[in-house]
Amino acid sequence: MLKPKHLGSLLLWWVYFSYLITIIEMVLIIALPLLQKYLINCDLIIKISDFCWLYFSKQCHQMPSRSLFIFKHQMFVCNRCFFVMIGNILTISILLKKKYLKEFLKHKAVFLALIIPPLIVELILKIFFSYASNFFVRSINGLCQGAASYSIVFIVINFLNKKFSFTNILYLVNYYKEK
């Protein structure tokens, strides 16, 4: 999709890496509660679960009242964080296809205008009106956060590829060395 001579390619490698990590996290979040149900006394599963609780505690509050449960086992992340991961995976999966990326870049303002307002509205309601969101609102908000974050990353990658190719940077460096 992007040529290695572009500076945005470095950022794209970060996207690939975070995409892989997010998929691994999703597998752990969904598979471990299922394995706990069927392999209750397995020490390896218990050790992996303990590690996951610690790992995900750094990025999520893990409150039981706001979490999803699989077979009476709480997921390692709350509902919002789970849907942020889903939004990340969906957005990256869609935007890595060249034809969808071109369409997205044509209509990026409209896309972001549809995604960002729910985030802002919920933030304003929470700050000024002590609004407590429900499961559905947290799910939608999480999807919007995940989609918006990687949409902005792809916009930045596109900008870097157009404006700052390595050949342009080398030209500028050589130009200023001569002066």
Image (cartoon, rainbow, N blue to C red):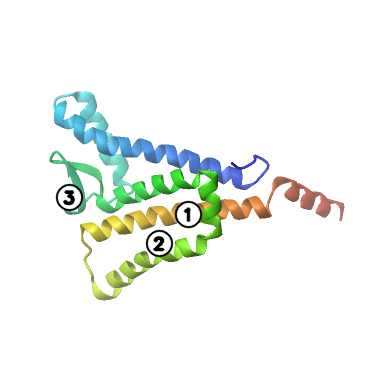
Q: Residues within 10 Å of mark 2 (few under 14, many from 20)?
A: many
* Residue assigned mark 2: 115
| Front in this rendered view, residue 40 or 9 | 9
Asked if disc 2 and disc 3 are in contact, CB closer than 8 Å, the reply is no
Can you give x and y, in whole percent of width and height, for residue 97 in the image?
51, 43
Asked if disc 1 and disc 3 are in contact, CB closer than 8 Å, the reply is no
Mark 2 residue type: Ile
Task: Provide the secondary structure element on which disc 2 rests.
Answer: helix
Q: Which of the two labelled residues, at mark 1 and mark 3, occupies the earlier sequence position? A: 3
Mark 3 residue type: Pro
Mark 1 residue type: Ser
Can you give x and y, in whole percent of width and height, for residue 70 in the image?
18, 40
Can you give x and y, in whole percent of width and height, for residue 93 in the image?
44, 43
In terms of image quadrants, where is residue 143? bottom left
Q: CA distance from mark 1 to mark 3?
A: 30 Å
Q: Is residue 122 left or right of residue 103?
A: left
Q: CA distance from mark 2 to mark 3?
A: 27 Å
* Residue assigned mark 3: 64
Q: Which of the two labelled residues, at mark 2 and mark 3, occupies the earlier sequence position? A: 3
Asked if disc 2 and disc 1 are in contact, CB closer than 8 Å, the reply is yes
Task: Provide the secondary structure element on which disc 1 rests.
Answer: helix
How many numbered circles are shown?
3
Which numbered tag is attached to residue 151? 1
| Front in this rendered view, residue 53 or 39 | 39
Q: Work out which residue is located at the far bottom of the displayed protein and give it.
A: 128
